[in-house]
Image (cartoon, coloured by chain):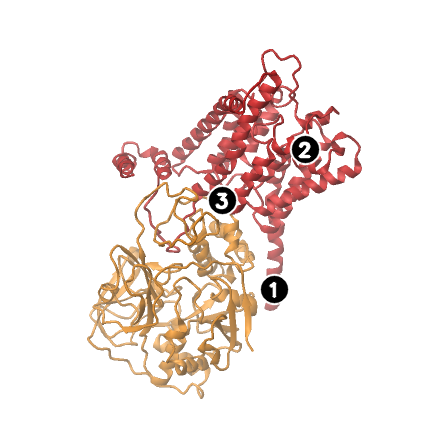
Amino acid sequence: MKFLENFFNKYKPLFDEGGKYEKLRPAYMAMYTFAFVPGETVKKGAQIRDAVDLKRVMFTVVLALIPATIFGMWNVGYQYFTQAGVAFTNWEAFVFGFWKVIPLIIVSYVVGLGIEFYFAIVRGHEVNEGYLVSGLLIPLIMPVSIPLWILALSVAFAVIIGKEVFGGTGMNIVNPALLARAFAFFAYPTFMSGNEVWIPKPENADAYSGETLLGALGQGNHIAYTWKDMLFGNIPGSIGETSVLMILIGAALLLFTKVASWRIMVSGFLGAALMAFIFNLWGANPLMNFPWWQHLLVGGLAFGVVFMATDPVTAAQTRRGKWIYGFLIGMFAIMIRVFNPAYPEGVMLAILLMNVVAPTIDHYVVQGNIKKRMKRFNKQAA
Amino acid sequence: MYKTVKISKGLNINLKGDADRLLQKASRSKMYAVKPNDFYGITPKLVARVGDRVKVGDVLFFSKKDDRIKITSPVSGQIEEIVRGEKRKILKILIKPDTEDTYKEFDSLDVAQADKTQILDQLLESGLFTYIKQRPYDIIASPDDKPKAIFISAYDSAPLSYDYDFALRNRQKDFQTGIDALKKLTEGKIYIITNGNTVSDFEKTEGVEIIKAFGPHPVGNVSIHIEKFEPLDKNSIVWVVNPVSVALMGSFFSAGKYNPEKHVALAGSKVKKPHYISIIPGADLSDIIKNDIEEDARLISGNVLTGQNVTKEPFLNYFDHQITAIPSGNKPRFMGWLPFFGENRKSFYRFNLSPWRKVKYDGNLYGEERAFVMNEEFESVMPLSIYPTHLLKAAILGDVEKMEQLGIFEVAPEDFALLDYISSSKIDTQDLIRKGLDEMKIQLG
């Protein structure tokens, strides 16, 4: 790798202070630190440091998303060919989906990273790694037929309004990826819901039925999928969220490496299960009667709880807070989807809501600690 | 009866180069430096002038705020230079040593008969008082303090730990004398923290409470034990003294001379034969240990978590008991950030697929500074009942009230050393806490 090192060293003076492209230094550093962990040594504080940095952490989340992404590509093709009624191989399904999904991923990264680089250069600080994850999350929670311009607009909105106005990764209040989806959902509802957005429409299909499972339930329609389909994920839905199995593989990686909080995942599923169970007992409509454990398999609940709720920046920060935060996400997700069939996106709304509430949860948890301390502090003094 | 303390949060980092229990006397250094910065919380008022001849124990400078607190020379010789920095701040006082030390004579004192004032006066006169630190603020104590307890940690749980039992193995009498003297300075108890997994000579100390500590680093840090046994309130102060300092005090009272020479561990993977050396604080290390250290080393006064990089100006800090040499780590690593394939160290995370492989810890920062993103990593190494992320954010903002509420009085920078190490955001948390404590001191006096 001497060659690459020399390459970077050769152009380094241009970006150093006083260099011709001094202002573009953040961009140069982003590329350089991607290729190399710099030789920079500790200035102050502990003299040795763990080899983990945000690049490693964020990249691990990207790795964890890969199974769901690949499955999502296959599922796009599978749904399409099934609707079209033609014979196909798994490989053909994957290739078809690949070419449908890749443009979305490219647009998401190009627009998002472009904005991130711009802000880094204007502000003169480093490009943060946070968008590595958001850039893949956003296409995965969109319907495959979303026009690229809506995607680009959503990404821009999420990165600028959701993140950069607060100061970048680490300062944002709500999850940027979910904000992108919420933006698209409320600004362009016709592209984001209904029966026709989840599957690329075959040209000459007569009986075309691409509604999602929750959509069907909401309308009181019969659902043709078994729980095995829901677990495996060959059902219509946003690109990456359908396969609970693939999501759980990603979850296993996140939990093994300890990148994501197991407390949030466990409490999220617990909250959802409990809420769905209560509705089962109530049983006033088909959505309420939908078995509680199947509620956990659909509507992107697993994807939301595993990849979105666990975002360390927007989640609760304290251990006790995480239990409460996760549990409420699960409960609200089911409650919203059951009470308001027009919003099968219960998970998205629940997480966004809890993102906003998370600092308050933390506040009360920390306040408990403070109260105990101040009581002791002042009692002994008296 | 022993008290026991057991913690589970923390982290043991195993570094190569633990010092053998073997003692060598260091050769005499060509230059000694006393750095006012080592005496945290003291603004120096110089007594010594360039060209003055000093004996061991002669006053070099005293505290501007309290002229009873004196800092004395560790070595006899001639003041060579007073190095100043920005705003004429005194950085170090260089002393060119005589070939042999001559000592200033103090009256020896029968500790058993002496009263508090006599002991305090003697400690102040000799400069030994500056070996006492106070909590809150983690600064040098004040003679007006009425400490409600004194904590002595004889258990160094940090990496390449210092073995107090070895270092003080022939000095039990001095240590006991020192304890007896300290006992007169507090109405409360004296606690000694020992490693619960071994039998320690310190357990035989009379008139003290022994705490046996179990668990990972930072279990040897006094903060954990203060929180448990003598939690601080608004008006209380606790003193902290190192066992080596206690022995120095003891020998001072019985012999009537201040001799700061002590055993220092020379450790780390860049040390050819790690061992203990007997050395005077302030010594220029470059000529003393030149032959012990391999090339391209990062030289640290202190341990790898709380020490200071002294590669450029290799003087042993006044209160440090350890010299550590590790690889400098100034080489870039191709895609070193990759999970599983890049380098792995002891971590909160599980990226290491071959934990049996030995890792060489070096001084590389391993990443760039970022905003706080991850939080469980901090909590995993913070055994105190505080919320580290919240406290650090309050410290960044300089919010005095919030810092007090979140428990800054209960911590010292050393308690955050593991957070420095473990942070994926590469934020210098010890520095933030130090600044936070300073801010508290300024605002609240």
Q: Residue at x 51, y 45 (%)?
A: A259
Tell me if I can see residue A161 in this picture: no
Instruction: Residue A32: give x, y in percent of width and height.
Output: 34, 37
Query: Which mark's residue is nearer the viewer, 2 or 1?
Result: 2
Q: Residues within 10 Å of mark 2 (few under 14, many from 20)?
A: some
The image quarter containing residue B282 is: bottom left
Instruction: Residue A33: give x, y in percent of width and height.
Output: 36, 39
Chain in red colour: A
Label 1 secondary element: helix
Question: In screen coordinates, is A274 left or right of B94?
Answer: right
Looking at marks 2 and 1 on the same chain, the residue that comes earlier in the sequence is marked by 2
Alpha carbon distance from label 2 to label 3: 37 Å
Question: In screen coordinates, is A56 left or right of A143?
Answer: left
Tell me if I can see residue A2 in this picture: yes
| Callout 1–callout 3 Cβ contact below 8 Å | no
Instruction: Residue B352: give x, y in percent of width and height.
Output: 44, 49
**Tag 3 subunit:** B
Residue hosting label 3: B373
Residue hosting label 2: A227
Q: Chain B is which colour?
A: orange
Under mark 3, the amino acid is Val
Q: Residues within 10 Å of mark 3 (few under 14, many from 20)?
A: many
Residue hosting label 1: A376
Question: In screen coordinates, is B57 left or right of B100?
Answer: right
Under mark 2, the amino acid is Trp
**Tag 2 subunit:** A
